[in-house]
Image (cartoon, rainbow, N blue to C red):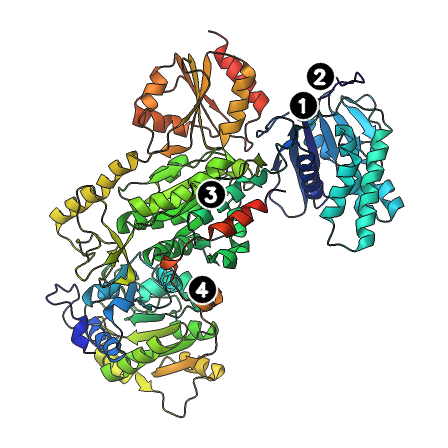
Amino acid sequence: MEAKVFDMGELDIAWCPGCGNFPILKTLKEAVAELDIDPTQLVMVSGIGQAAKIPHYLKAHVFNGLHGRALPPATAIKAANPKLTVIAESGDGDMCGEGGNHFIHCIRRNPNITNIVHDNRVYGLTKGQAAPTSPLGFKTPVQIHGVCSEPFNPMAVAIALNASLVARANAQDREQTKELMKKAITHKGYALLDILQPCVTYNKLNTYQWFKEHTYYLDDSYDPHDRMAAFQKATETEKLPLGVLYLSPDKPPFEDNTGIYHEDSRPLYERQVDVEKLRGLMTSLVS
Amino acid sequence: MTDGKGSRRRDDISIVLCGQAGQGVQTVEYLLTRLLKLAGYHVFATKEYMSRVRGGMNSTTIRVSSREVAAYVHRIDVLVPLGKGALGHVAARVSTHTIVLGEREIVGDDPAGQSFRFLEIPFTKMASDIGNKIYSNIVAVGAVAQLLGIDLEHLTDHVRRSFARKPAEVVDDNAKAARAGYEAAGGLGIDDLKLTPAPAGQVKDRLLLDGAEAVSLGAIAGGCNFVSSYPMSPSTPVLTFLAQHDREFGIIVEQAEDEISAINMAIGAWYAGARALVTTSGGGFALMTEGVSLAGMLETPVVIHLAQRPGPATGLPTRTEQGDLELALHAGHGEFPRIILAPGTLDEGFRLGWQAFNLADKHQVPVFILTDEYYIDSYYDAPAFDLSQAGVERHVVRTTKDYRRYVITQDGASPRGVPGYGEGLVVVDSDEHDEQGHITEDLDLRVRMVNKRLAKGELLDADVVPPTLIGPQDYKNLVICWGSTYHPVKEAIAQLGRDDTAMLHYSQVYPLHSGTADYMTRADRTIIVEGNATGQFARLVELHAGVPADELLLKYNGLNFGVEELVDRLNELLKDE
């Protein structure tokens, strides 16, 4: 399938020129096209923020919900119809700040969805305040003395929770980002893909150049099944490792654990109430 | 009433069991209510309990009668104290007519001279003589059965059946304990609590269930197949009931990390074609309010069971109140239509339970089922629910390639598609959006979208559940109530014995039925009864029907209304005519 299948035609895109969201959007279209996912089988779920507008810019079903709340509906959509491919995609503020509790518990729940986080270490849409991921000392119009809270580390948190797949990409490297997107989408279980990207307007520190100089690729000798090694990689901050940091592949997904698809693969919208069973249940309340 | 032997027979007896959590109140309650129903009597039971797992002091009131009973009464005919402190806990309800049945050391050293009749039966000693003091609660069941004149056969059969899964000697010992209690009470010569003979065959086949079960069965009948909630008293029994039947009915039941997640999951599930429910209370629902607004904007259906308890904040976690009507009415920022149902009877709990799902699906709005602790925890026998009327009305369309989720229609409702069903794309956005569903800042379009969403409100009026009028059509006094106060108010008005007073009960409180002003202006005097401190329904009525109530009859100490206090307070309000 060609990536242009996902093109929306003429669009007034709300991102700044040079924004890291552009290469991510382009790469995502290529990834789903190469996987031959029909737009009618793809649901893009997001919260609020500049990254969270991405579902509006490619052809797919869209659930653009509340700030921080992408993961609960994404989990439910997949559970209500496991035949759909579900991607929950938002910024680091949305996923790790406002939605931090859902991020934690979504990983525990392990729905078979892909969670793409645009990690630019700053708030864009609200005009330049610190993100949970902003580095110590990072100055903004609100954090005028510099950030003094420990930066949120989505990789380390996910590995601590034994997430099914944990990966990091750099938006500039579209080829690797695409391969990691495809891995995450085809992986059975919750897959976190954190994508490093600059904010050209509000983050003068973590620029394209900065990410280039502060990242490196995990090579073939690295075993992502080793949780302790993965945790060590996740806590490296001088130079950030790119690739699949952690894999815990044998966990049953949430929708399998519901038990309702074992003998009946129909999505919920096709199902009917069993009235005779209901009559039996009601009759059991006679005494 | 007298029988052939000249002794009085009673038709409506209230039995109160009281003790600490863990002392057997629930066991005695379970065995007695089922026994009385099997023996052909109507039963009602409700409990009041403290917010703790062990200890404290809890009580259950059981009413038994040959007539239908469904409301709490204050008076106690028989008190069975199962732990020290029980007498003090219910002292305000004990009178010279009360028979206290039990052990001297629980009741007190010298019960003589106290204001009740004390019948001593050493439950624990008798149980120990049979083999184990844990049978003491069964001795109590036997003693109560004797006082009420239940057949010994009924009693021992019932006890044997109830313990049938236990080893044979445990079954035998329980039956012995029941018989021992029965015989001991027989030796006391009390025959003024014997029940009138039960009406033949009326009760045995009826359901015995509580409000939580009625709402849960209604939800299943309405096609509920997804429940996401966070446990919170008193809403949790609905979550528990549905969880216990999840695979049987293909229901996904998920305990969410918080109520915010719960409602966002439910909205996501509806978006993908499920029929989802959240069940919550007080502060839990407060956390959901942004989600309610999301449902309003996405025009995605959602059903919210809100079991009220007293607030603000944590309030009284295990008590009752009708204090969250205005919260449900106004929850969520922005302007959008909604429906608020408030069942009063168990049958309404079932009917409104399934109708809530159909209404939500049809109108694409949040639908509330507003109950409270009293409604959820009270149970009585009721006729089997009519399943032939119940059913799933689906309003999901198969999408075509050019599908637009928010196509502007005359009446506001746009056909709702779900992802994966048809050729189209289903786009929903919490931002203001165009007909396709994509984000927009076109302000003319904004106005059209607001108008479209609000236009659905007019459609809701056609489906409003009418209020129930009980009593004379040519009433002078109209007593208005809503939700769980149905039965207490009904019984109180019947006891008033006035042919100029009627009751009007609302099981849908919003949108308000259009005949409300007419009902009210026909009366010389209107009284609104509700379980809150400020008269929230009265305000709603005044705002939407334009008629203020003459009197408010309110209660907000955490307990439900009792029949006697309603009789007294209504008499007081009506006396100066």
Identify the secondary structure beneath mark 1. loop
Closer to the camera: disc 2 or disc 3?
3
Local crowd at mark 4 within 10 Å, few (<14), some, or many (≥20)? Answer: some
- The residue at which mark 1 appears reads as B11
Identify the secondary structure beneath mark 4. helix
Instruction: Specify the amino acid type for callout 2.
Output: Met
Give the label on residue B1, or none.
2
Instruction: Specify the amino acid type for callout 4.
Output: His
Instruction: Specify the amino acid type for callout 1.
Output: Asp
Circles 4 and 3 on the same chain: no
Closer to the camera: disc 1 or disc 4?
1
Marks 2/3 in contact by CB < 8 Å: the verdict is no
Local crowd at mark 2 within 10 Å, few (<14), some, or many (≥20)? Answer: few
Circles 4 and 2 on the same chain: no
Q: Is residue B382 left or right of residue B41?
A: left
Identify the secondary structure beneath mark 2. loop
The residue located at (51%, 23%) in the rendering is B490
